[in-house]
């Protein structure tokens, strides 16, 4: 089987991942809706996943792809917990705008 | 044997002092007796030792134990009874005994009777240490110790804050001198690696290292400063008149006869050092002469009987210093001794008067006392004649010798000294006339109280008066026993090249007599013939006022030294301390302020936290990967 | 017998005092204090007989730290000061109402333990541990039993703690640096460390910060007066009587012999600072209204002179410094006790509110006077011996140091006599003033006797410390 | 590995106990179990084995830290009974979560493979998110959980990206293989970029400046026992992991790296201390103090080869003191909305024992000799000086005395005796708190007197 990476070039994948990663980062920085922020974090994780897969292929090594499964499981668990927290917050203050969370400061 | 003599000499007054201080209250009148006996024993021991030394010509020496050891030498608790110290001890313990005796009556009824004798004995103890010490540091113990006793006794009536001020002033002014003394000690230690009189003397005699001469000069100057403090010379003399706040016998003993002459003793002791410092000697002579004149001029117009005597003391001490300045140590010592006799007599006499007057010291309130107190009057008159230079009394010879020496060395100082002598004659007779002659000017109550003092007070007066008359015999012009006696301790002794009495000497004696007469007649005309009484304080004007206020020296010192120190102290306390504290703890304030600002920055906004996070990452990555 | 027994006695004393409960606490503490004192005497006798009472064992192997205690004459002399003053200080507070007295006396004993340890330690880290440990008890003593309201005193005490702690941390850095060079904290190894001039300079500076604050040398003294004022008198006595000496002792024991080159180089500056302290302290003392602050500034002046003596780097100066440390310890404890006695009767520490006491309490006045004259270094008192040695040492370096340092003679007399006059003399005070009771007489009497006896016969002490100092001086050369 | 499995089994047992209604047994059982596991781990501390293709490697370093974690967990579990009194029905959830967290922590110090590291990190983090928000009705707890979650998963993302880059450069997740590869030839820049990103992720976990902002907020909002856990167990874990990662991965780093670490360490200490100066909430104060301690512990990163023992000592001292401090904090602020420092006032009278425990804990953190904290600092300083980082040490020293200021402030408040607001009634403290507090302090003093006990483990 022909290696896709050799056709396109690993650097392109890296750039793409970095761009995705940065989109995630900027999303987190500029959005105040908690759900959207969760999604941005997912983008970040997935950019990393993509990078892992790309390198896995590049190195002809399956470990990277196995790692991605771990990551996905972890991310799922993380989001589950995150959403649970979000629900309790919504119950308490009736909003998911994180700018309203300013009780703790100083 | 030698050590025992020394111990006996020292410990008896110390014991007396301790007994009186601790058990004075229980002893009652006994404490006076104990104290007097203690000094008497010392006196007897001194006489025995004197006889021995005078016979064998070898000093008595003894080291008790090592006291202080420094790297290059050690200082032992050692004593040296040679001709000089024995001479001093003789009149210290002798006059001391008389004054103790006198005090038993004078102080009777005082609530701290026992303590008074305790202090007085302690004074004798320290004076003995001062005089008998075999090295400079032992002398220094005595030196400071007598200062302490002086402080205690001036402020003896401690309820009166003015007296306490006087005591404090005396102590502090003395301490200025003491610092000088100590500095002198350090220089000598630096030069000779010893503080022992004998060792220093030997070292100086054997080697003539000219390089050290400057340092010798410095040492001499420093020690002279010490002497200035103790012997009340310009500029540190102001404490002595104030010291009259103490009981009168104290003034007689400490502030006239003994302690204040310690300066002369010290310089005489170190004559071999001073001989090498001609510049310092000149300074001494000049300071002495000016002190003599200055103090005498103030004495002219004082109305407090003790103040007059005090200024007279300062003036006489000035004359002694003048003599020392000319290198005539024996002459100074001679005057010290005669002065001790007549000045003690004068003070005790004035004490007798004050006793009779019920504490009144202002001569304007006295007068005509000769009728009530014959013994006091006569002895007082004798002593006055002696101090004024009535021919063939003790003062005549000693003062004349000083003037003679001055005439030889420096005519200007001779004139100053002579003027001071004339003034002395004037104010002393003014004192006698105002106190004892004419009518009584005090209150009726005082008049009824007037009486002659008891025998324990008059006896010392009589003894001292006799000594004032015949004291001059120890150094009869032309054939001085004193010069011979002191020859071993004084390097450039006058006994080595005696000179016969020539025309010059007789002429000077004549001049002195004339001077005495001028003073006497001046006083006589003013206070007997014209029957003047000094004006009340508020009427005094002009130069008279300046004199009466002692040239405002106290006020000037106050403005120049005391006040500025207080101002600086306040400044340090209120400004510098606060600033220093602020400088150190200001850092704390900065941290505190930063903390406050930091708290504001931490505003609880997740967005900010994330931003800081990302910013931190970017900075780190930039620094690590892009910047280089 | 070796010195560990002494240290253990004090430590056990601290614990026993705590356990014994409130009532007997003071007595238990006094008992242990006296036992420690006797042990010190025995140790000194042993030392004079030639037995070495030191102790050494490994504590931590990596880094190489020992429990090393050196009991030479110098250390023993200061130990003697500590163990002699501790019972006196404890006894002085008998009869005072002290809350939770068992904790209080336990802390006093513990502090005594730590200070003794500081004097004896011969391993840098052990020394540092003791040094810091001694800070804790005094902090709590001052904080919990101090004068004034809590709010007011806590600031002063906190300032004191932080300031001294800050200084000593730099000393720790100095030690660590030395360790990195020599691989040992042992005093002897540090003495033999061959550091270059620059290295010595930095180590010297690090040590100096700690000591200058502790001593305190001008201008690092700002904690002193307020701490003395706010601490309870027992605490003040411990501070002024013993703790200040830790700094001075350390200068001689640690700083100078370890960094001789730097010490020589910096000497003039430090001498000037010390002497400024002498004059400055004296002048500021003149205008103090509170008697404890007054004594604080007088201490500043005195320790300034002692510091100057230590930094002369000459045998004489150092000897004077050590003697004066001991003398000052006894005198200042006595003086603070005098202040406390007045406070017990008049409930005031303001000099202006006293006066006219001498008439009512002649015994008290006499002893006060002895202490006062001792404080101003009258010959015949112990202080004079030290002062003379120090000034002599200074004069051998440069006469001007001695001249200006010697102004303490004048200023000392000035402020002391002024205070005495205001506090004790004058018209009899309307408020009654009971003369000394037995306990007070014993304490002050003992102090007075010690001061005068050692003033006349200081040889035993001088002989005790001289060999150690000779050794230290040999490292300077 | 056996340790890890045993803990896992214990956690499952705890959950089973809930099912069969043996709630009361949960805590004793856990403590006994953990003590047994601790004993086992300590006994095998020298055993070095690797499991599952180097996924999990036990070494002295990991065993020692694992033992410390287990010991800390024992304390924290022991405190749980009284802390969760009101919601005792959920006790087994809490306990099992703590045990899972412990597993994560052990994975983090014992990993032999980046996957294991990442899993450990996530197990630790996720359980901690849950524990943070466990006080559901409390808005502060929610907020803390949210903040921690957002920032924590953000950091996870960065770590993951870093791992991906490292993988890209070395084609392996295995630590030993990575070491072999990195020591052989020049690697692409991604490698060091990846390592830096992983390190940044860990710096976030230890709350180093400027990634520290979450710490005070989260500490304050979380239930106190969770805060105690974060402040002791989690912080120590993070530091140990950071050290281990640095030890293994730091190769071919850009030359400014060490400077950057030093600067971050200095900033961390300083910011932590300065911010702590004016805190009024005890938990926030301890949070900031924890930040500054993280800065101190970062000093160990300047001497990777030699300071494992020092770091372990410091971590133990710090964590033990933290346990003692939080014990008292919990005892005093029980049932209170805010954990103000003011509420400690008069503690010296109300409960002297607790006051002494807290004093010792704080003094130890401040670095007063004879308490373990002093030696911790001392060893780190020594190491740093011998490596030539004098500036760092001087900043450390300056920070030490800044820190002593606020520690003493708390102590002063405790011994204030003339405050009207202070409750004069004696404070009754549950037995478990007393035992934990005293035990922690005792350990502190013992390891202070004989530091060799801990130091010799690493020789």
Image: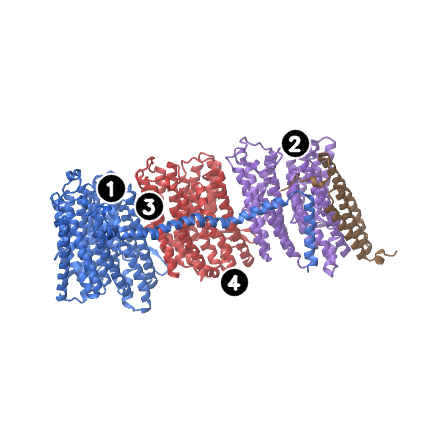
Report the quarter where the C terminus of chain C lies.
Answer: bottom left
* Residue D46 rendering spot, x and y as whole percentages: 66, 49
Quarter of the image for residue B183 reads bottom left
Q: What is the CA distance from the residue labelled 2 to the residue labelled 3? A: 68 Å
Which dot, 4 or 3, sits closer to the camera?
Answer: 3
Is B588 displayed left or right of B168 in the figure?
right
Q: Which residue in the structure is indicated by mark 1?
A: B114
What colour denotes chain D?
purple
Q: For the residues tagged 4 and 3, is the chain the same?
A: yes
Chain letter belonging to callout 3: C
Q: What is the CA distance from the residue labelled 1 to the residue labelled 4? A: 66 Å
Q: What is the CA distance from the residue labelled 2 to the residue labelled 1? A: 81 Å
Q: Which residue in the structure is indicated by mark 2?
A: D85
Chain letter belonging to callout 1: B
Q: Which mark is residue C196?
A: 4
* Residue D149 rendering spot, x and y as whole percentages: 71, 42
């Amino acid at each position: 089987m022909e290696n896709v990476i050799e056709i396109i070039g690993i650097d392109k994948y890296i750039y793409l991942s970095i761009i995705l990663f940065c989109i995630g980062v900027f999303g987190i920085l500029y959005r105040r809706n908690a759900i959207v922020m969760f999604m941005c974090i997912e983008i970040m994780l997935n950019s990393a996943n993509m990078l892992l897969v790309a390198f896995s292929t590049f190195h002809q090594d399956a470990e990277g792809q196995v790692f991605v499964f771990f990551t996905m499981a972890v991310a799922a668990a993380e989001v589950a917990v995150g959403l649970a927290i979000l629900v309790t917050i919504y119950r308490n203050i009736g909003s998911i705008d994180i700018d309203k969370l300013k009780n703790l400061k100083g | 044997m030698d050590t025992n003599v020394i111990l006996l000499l020292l410990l008896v007054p110390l014991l007396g002092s301790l007994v009186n201080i601790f058990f004075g209250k229980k002893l009652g009148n006994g404490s006076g007796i104990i104290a007097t006996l203690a000094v008497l024993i010392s006196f007897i021991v001194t006489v025995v030792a004197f006889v021995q030394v005078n016979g064998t010509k070898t000093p008595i020496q003894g080291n008790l134990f090592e006291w202080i050891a420094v790297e290059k030498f050690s200082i032992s608790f050692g004593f040296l009874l040679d001709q000089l110290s024995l001479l001093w001890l003789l009149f210290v313990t002798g006059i001391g005994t008389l004054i103790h005796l006198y005090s038993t009556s004078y102080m009777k009824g005082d609530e701290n009777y026992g303590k008074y004798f305790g202090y007085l004995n302690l004074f004798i103890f320290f004076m003995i240490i001062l005089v008998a010490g075999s090295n400079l540091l032992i002398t220094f113990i005595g030196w400071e110790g007598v200062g302490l006793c002086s402080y205690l006794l001036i402020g003896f009536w401690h309820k009166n804050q003015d007296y306490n001020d006087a005591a404090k002033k005396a102590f502090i002014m003395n301490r200025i001198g003491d610092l000088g003394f100590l500095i002198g000690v350090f220089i000598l230690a630096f030069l000779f690696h010893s503080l022992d009189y004998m060792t220093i003397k030997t070292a100086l005699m054997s080697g003539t290292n000219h390089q050290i001469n400057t340092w010798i000069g410095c040492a001499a100057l420093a020690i002279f400063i010490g002497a200035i403090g103790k012997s009340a010379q310009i500029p540190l003399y102001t404490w002595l008149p104030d010291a009259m706040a103490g009981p009168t016998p104290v003034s007689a003993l400490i502030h006239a006869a003994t302690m204040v002459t310690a300066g002369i003793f010290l310089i005489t002791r170190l004559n071999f050092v001073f001989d090498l410092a001609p510049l310092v000697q000149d300074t001494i002579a000049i300071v002495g002469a000016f002190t003599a004149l200055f103090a005498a001029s103030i004495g002219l117009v004082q109305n407090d009987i003790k103040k007059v005597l005090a200024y007279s003391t300062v003036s006489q001490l000035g004359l002694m210093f003048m003599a020392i300045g000319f290198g005539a140590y024996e002459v100074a010592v001679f005057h010290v001794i005669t002065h001790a006799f007549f000045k003690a007599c004068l003070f005790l006499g004035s004490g007798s008067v004050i006793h009779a007057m019920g504490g009144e010291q202002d001569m304007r309130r006295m007068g005509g006392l000769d009728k009530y107190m014959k013994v006091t009057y006569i002895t007082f008159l004798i002593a006055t004649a002696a101090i004024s230079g009535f021919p063939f009394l003790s003062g005549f010879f000693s003062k004349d010798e000083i003037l003679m020496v001055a005439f030889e060395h420096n005519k200007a100082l001779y004139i100053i000294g002579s003027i001071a002598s004339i003034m002395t004659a004037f104010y002393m007779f003014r004192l006698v006339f105002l106190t004892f002659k004419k009518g009584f000017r005090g209150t009726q109550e005082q008049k009824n109280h007037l009486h002659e003092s008891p025998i324990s007070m008059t006896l010392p007066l009589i003894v001292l008066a006799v000594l004032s008359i015949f004291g001059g015999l120890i150094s009869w012009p032309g054939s001085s026993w004193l010069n011979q006696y002191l020859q071993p301790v004084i390097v450039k002794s006058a006994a080595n090249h005696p000179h016969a009495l020539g025309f010059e000497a007789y002429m000077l004696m004549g001049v002195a007599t004339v001077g005495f007469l001028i003073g006497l007649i001046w006083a006589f005309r003013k206070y007997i013939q014209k029957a003047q009484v000094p004006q009340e304080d508020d009427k005094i004007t002009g130069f008279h006022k300046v004199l009466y206020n002692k040239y405002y020296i106290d006020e000037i010192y106050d403005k120049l030294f005391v006040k500025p120190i207080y101002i600086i102290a306040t400044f340090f306390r209120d400004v510098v301390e606060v600033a220093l504290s602020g400088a150190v703890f200001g850092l704390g304030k900065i941290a505190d302020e930063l903390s406050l600002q930091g708290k504001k920055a931490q505003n609880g906004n997740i967005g900010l936290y994330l931003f800081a996070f990302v910013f931190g990452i970017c900075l780190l990555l930039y620094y690590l990967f892009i910047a280089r | 017998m070796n010195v560990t027994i002494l240290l253990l006695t004090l430590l056990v004393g601290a614990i026993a005092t705590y356990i014994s409960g409130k009532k007997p606490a003071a007595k238990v503490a006094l008992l242990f204090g006296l036992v420690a004192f006797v042990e010190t005497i025995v140790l000194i006798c042993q030392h004079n007989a030639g037995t070495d009472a030191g102790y050494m064992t490994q504590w931590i192997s990596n880094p190489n730290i020992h429990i090393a205690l050196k009991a030479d004459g110098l250390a023993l002399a200061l130990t003697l000061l500590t163990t002699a003053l501790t019972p006196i200080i404890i006894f002085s507070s008998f009869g005072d109402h002290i809350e939770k007295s068992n904790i209080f006396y336990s802390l006093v004993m513990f502090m005594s333990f730590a200070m003794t340890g500081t004097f004896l330690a011969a391993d840098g880290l052990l020394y540092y541990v003791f040094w810091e440990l001694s800070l804790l008890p005094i902090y709590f003593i001052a904080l919990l039993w101090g004068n004034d309201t809590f709010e007011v005193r806590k600031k002063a005490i906190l300032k004191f703690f932080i300031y001294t702690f800050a200084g000593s941390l730099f000393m720790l850095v100095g030690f660590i640096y030395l360790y990195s060079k020599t691989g040992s904290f042992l005093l002897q190894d540090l003495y033999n460390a061959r550091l270059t001039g620059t290295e010595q300079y930095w180590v010297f500076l690090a040590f100096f910060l700690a000591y200058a604050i502790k001593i305190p040398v001008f201008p690092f003294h700002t904690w002193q007066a307020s701490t003395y004022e706010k601490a309870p008198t027992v605490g003040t006595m411990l501070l002024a009587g013993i703790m200040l000496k830790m700094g001075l002792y350390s200068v001689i024991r640690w700083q100078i012999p370890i960094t001789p080159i730097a010490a020589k180089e910096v000497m003039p500056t430090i001498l000037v600072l010390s002497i400024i302290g002498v004059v400055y302290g004296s002048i500021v003392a003149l205008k103090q209204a509170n008697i404890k602050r007054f004594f604080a500034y007088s201490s500043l002046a005195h320790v300034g002179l002692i510091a100057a003596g230590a930094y002369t780097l000459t045998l004489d100066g150092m000897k004077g410094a050590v003697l004066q440390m001991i003398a000052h310890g006894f005198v200042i404890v006595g003086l603070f006790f005098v202040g406390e006695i007045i406070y017990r009767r008049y409930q005031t520490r303001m000099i202006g509110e006293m006066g006219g006491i001498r008439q009512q309490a002649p015994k008290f006045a006499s002893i006060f006077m002895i202490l006062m004259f001792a404080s101003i270094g009258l010959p015949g008192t112990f202080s004079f011996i030290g002062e003379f040695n120090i000034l002599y040492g200074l004069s051998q370096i440069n006469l001007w140091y001695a001249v200006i340092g010697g102004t303490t003679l004048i200023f000392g007399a000035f402020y002391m006599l002024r205070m005495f006059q205001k506090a004790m003399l004058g018209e009899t005070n309307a408020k009654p003033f009971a003369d000394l009771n037995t306990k007070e007489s014993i304490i002050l009497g003992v102090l007075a006797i010690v001061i005068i006896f050692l003033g006349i016969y200081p040889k035993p002490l001088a002989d005790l410390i001289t060999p150690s100092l000779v050794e230290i001086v040999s490292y300077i050369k | 590995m056996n340790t890890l499995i045993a803990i896992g089994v214990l956690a499952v047992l705890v959950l089973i106990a809930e099912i069969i209604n043996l709630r009361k047994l949960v805590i004793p059982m856990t403590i006994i179990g953990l003590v047994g596991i601790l004993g086992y781990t300590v006994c095998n501390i020298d055993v070095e084995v690797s499991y599952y293709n180097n996924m999990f490697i036990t070494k002295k370093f990991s065993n020692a830290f694992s033992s410390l974690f287990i010991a800390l967990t024992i304390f924290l579990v022991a405190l749980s009974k009284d802390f969760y009194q009101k919601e005792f029905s959920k006790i087994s959830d809490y306990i099992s979560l703590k045990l899972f967290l412990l597993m994560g922590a052990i994975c983090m110090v014992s990993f032999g493979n980046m996957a294991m590291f990442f899993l450990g990190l996530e197990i630790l983090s996720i359980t901690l998110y849950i524990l943070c928000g466990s006080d559901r009705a409390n808005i502060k707890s929610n907020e803390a959980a949210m903040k921690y979650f957002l920032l924590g998963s953000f950091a996870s993302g960065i770590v993951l990206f870093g791992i991906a880059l490292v993988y890209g450069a070395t084609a392996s997740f295995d630590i030993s293989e990575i070491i072999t590869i990195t020591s052989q030839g020049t690697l692409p820049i991604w490698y060091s970029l990846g390592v830096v990103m992983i390190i940044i992720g860990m710096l976030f976990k230890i709350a180093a400046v400027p990634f520290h902002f979450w710490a005070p907020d989260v500490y304050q909002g979380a239930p106190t026992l969770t805060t105690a856990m974060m402040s002791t167990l989690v912080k120590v874990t993070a530091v140990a992991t950071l050290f281990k990662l640095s030890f293994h991965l730091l190769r071919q780093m850009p030359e400014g790296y060490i400077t950057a670490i030093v600067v971050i360490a200095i900033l961390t200490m300083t910011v932590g201390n300065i911010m702590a100066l004016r805190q009024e909430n005890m938990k926030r104060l301890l949070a900031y103090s924890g930040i500054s301690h993280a800065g101190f512990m970062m000093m160990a990163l300047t001497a990777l080869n030699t300071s494992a023992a020092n770091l372990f000592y410091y971590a133990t001292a710090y964590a033990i003191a933290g346990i003692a401090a939080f014990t008292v904090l919990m005892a005093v602020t029980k049932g209170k909305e805010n954990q103000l420092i003011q509420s400690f006032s008069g503690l010296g009278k109300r409960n002297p024992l607790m006051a002494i425990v807290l004093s010792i804990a704080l003094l130890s953190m401040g670095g007063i000799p004879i308490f373990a904290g002093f030696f911790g600092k001392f060893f780190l300083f020594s190491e740093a000086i011998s490596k030539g980082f004098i500036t760092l040490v001087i900043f450390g020293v300056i920070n030490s005395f800044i820190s002593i200021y606020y520690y003493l402030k708390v102590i002063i408040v405790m011994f204030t005796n003339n405050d009207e607001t202070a409750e004069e009634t004696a404070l009754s403290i549950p037995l478990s708190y007393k035992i934990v507090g005293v035990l922690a302090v005792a350990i502190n003093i013992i390891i202070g007197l004989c530091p060799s006990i801990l130091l010799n483990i690493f020789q």
